[in-house]
């Protein structure tokens, strides 16, 4: 994992650097002998300068949060961000739209 200078990581952010696929091809768990393990997913996570990860965001393995990007609170980041991109949880934005319609 690499955190570049002047990036911001809020409380509760989780970086998933290694995990099991959970596809039923093996037994899931860190202490299971290698021959019985499920396939593992992993990769280096990079948070570039001036990027911000807000509270309780989750970053999956092998991703890059690009320079000046913002990942909104309670978001699950499953793909790389572009320069200056704002990512947020789609469920929150849908809720905000529905709430405005009912007012």
Image (cartoon, helix red, strand yellow):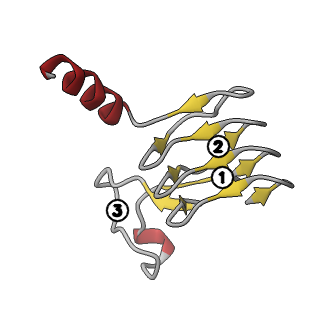
Crowd class of label 1 (few under 14; some 14 to 19; many from 20; radius 10 Å): some
Between disc 1 and disc 2, the foreground one is 2
Determine whether label 1 and label 3 are within 8 Å by CB. no
* Mark 1 vs mark 3, CA separation in Å: 20 Å
Between disc 1 and disc 3, the foreground one is 1
**Which residue is under mark 1?**
43
Residue 26: mark? 3
From the viewer's perspective, tell me whether residue 25 is left or right of residue 42.
left
Q: Position of residue 33 (x, y in %)?
A: 46, 78
The local secondary structure at tag 2 comes to loop
4 to 65, vertically: above or below: below
Mark 1 vs 2, N-terminal side: 1
41 to 93, vertically: above or below: below
Q: Residue at x 27, y 22 (%)?
A: 97
**Which residue is under mark 2?**
63
Where, quadrant-wise, is the C terminus in this rendering? top left
* Mark 1 vs mark 2, CA separation in Å: 8 Å
Q: Position of residue 13 (x, y in %)?
A: 53, 61
Q: Residue at x 35, y 29 (%)?
A: 93
In the picture, residue 76 is in which quadrant? top left
From the viewer's perspective, tell me whether residue 71 is left or right of residue 35.
right
Q: How many marks?
A: 3
């Amino acid at each position: 994992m690499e955190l570049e200078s002047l990036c911001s990581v809020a409380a509760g952010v989780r970086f998933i650097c290694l995990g099991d696929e959970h596809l039923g091809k093996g037994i899931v768990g860190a202490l299971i002998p290698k021959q019985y393990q499920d396939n593992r997913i992993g990769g280096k996570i990079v948070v570039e300068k001036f990027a911000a990860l807000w509270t309780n965001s989750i970053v999956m393995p092998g991703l890059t949060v690009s320079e000046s990007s913002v990942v909104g609170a309670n978001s699950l980041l499953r793909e790389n961000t572009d320069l200056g991109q704002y990512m947020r949880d789609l469920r929150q934005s849908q809720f905000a739209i529905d709430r405005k319609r009912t007012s």
